[in-house]
Image (spheres, rainbow, N blue to C red):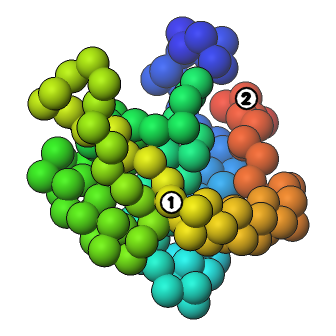
Amino acid sequence: MTAQEGRPETAPLTKRDFEALAEFRFGIRRYLRFSEETVRHHGLTPQQYQLLLALKGFPGREWATVGELADRLQLRHHSTVELVDRAHGKGLVDRVAHPQDARAVQVVLTEQGEQVLGRLSALHRDQLGRMRTVLTLPTWQEADEG
């Protein structure tokens, strides 16, 4: 049994289960497309927006190391370095010496990065509000109800 569903993981899916999964996946894709188009319209790439959001939303502090960002973004370290470089070139982030580790740097949002992130995140929050019913986790039907 899985802890979340309280059902065996091998339980067969019903037609309604497939419909619920497909609808949920459709909602996720609609939201991601909205996000991609919105951030591009504001001059950023989707990855740059994700970087800014990961920085501002990092638990307990206003900065993160490249390694922490790589983990949050599910990117390789060198890809994250390139992403930070591009965001730095646009004036969205800065690098600050890490006070305890001379090998590491803290990546922080600039004032411009904060402003851009604030505008874009408000648009994303509003879109999520409009999509609330579509992005609700599916409920699973019993196999004999299908």
Give the residue type at disc 1.
Answer: Thr
Residue name at image x 67 percent, y 31 percent:
143
Crowding near pointer 2: few (<14 within 10 Å), some, many (20+)? few
Pinpoint residue 15: horizontal percent, then vertical percent: 66, 50
**Between discs 1 and 2, the one toward the N terminus:** 1
Secondary structure type for disc 1: loop
Relative to 105, is 112 on the left or the right?
right
Please state the horizontal and vertical placement of residue 63, each as a whole percent of the image. Answer: 46, 38
Amino acid type shown at disc 2:
Glu
**Residue 34 falls in image quadrant:** bottom right
Task: Tell whether label 2 touches label 1 (CB within 8 Å).
Answer: no
The quarter holding residue 144 reads top right
In the rendered view, would you say 56 is above or below 40?
A: above
Relative depth, front residue between 22 and 146: 22
Rendered image quadrant of residue 85: bottom left
Residue 21: x and y in percent read 62, 51
Residue for point 31% across, 25% down: 99
Q: With 20 as the anchor, is 53 left or right in this view?
A: left
Q: 99 or 70: which is nearer to us?
A: 99
Q: Is residue 16 visible?
A: no
Q: Which residue is mark 1?
A: 110
Which sits in the foreground, 119 or 2?
Answer: 119
* Quarter of the image that includes the C terminus: top right
Disc ID at residue 142: 2
Front position among marks 1 and 2 = 1
Relative to residue 104, is residue 20 drawn left or right? right
Name the residue at 74% across, 54% down. Answer: 135
As drawn, 90 above or below 139:
below
Q: Residue at point 56% right, 69% down?
A: 112
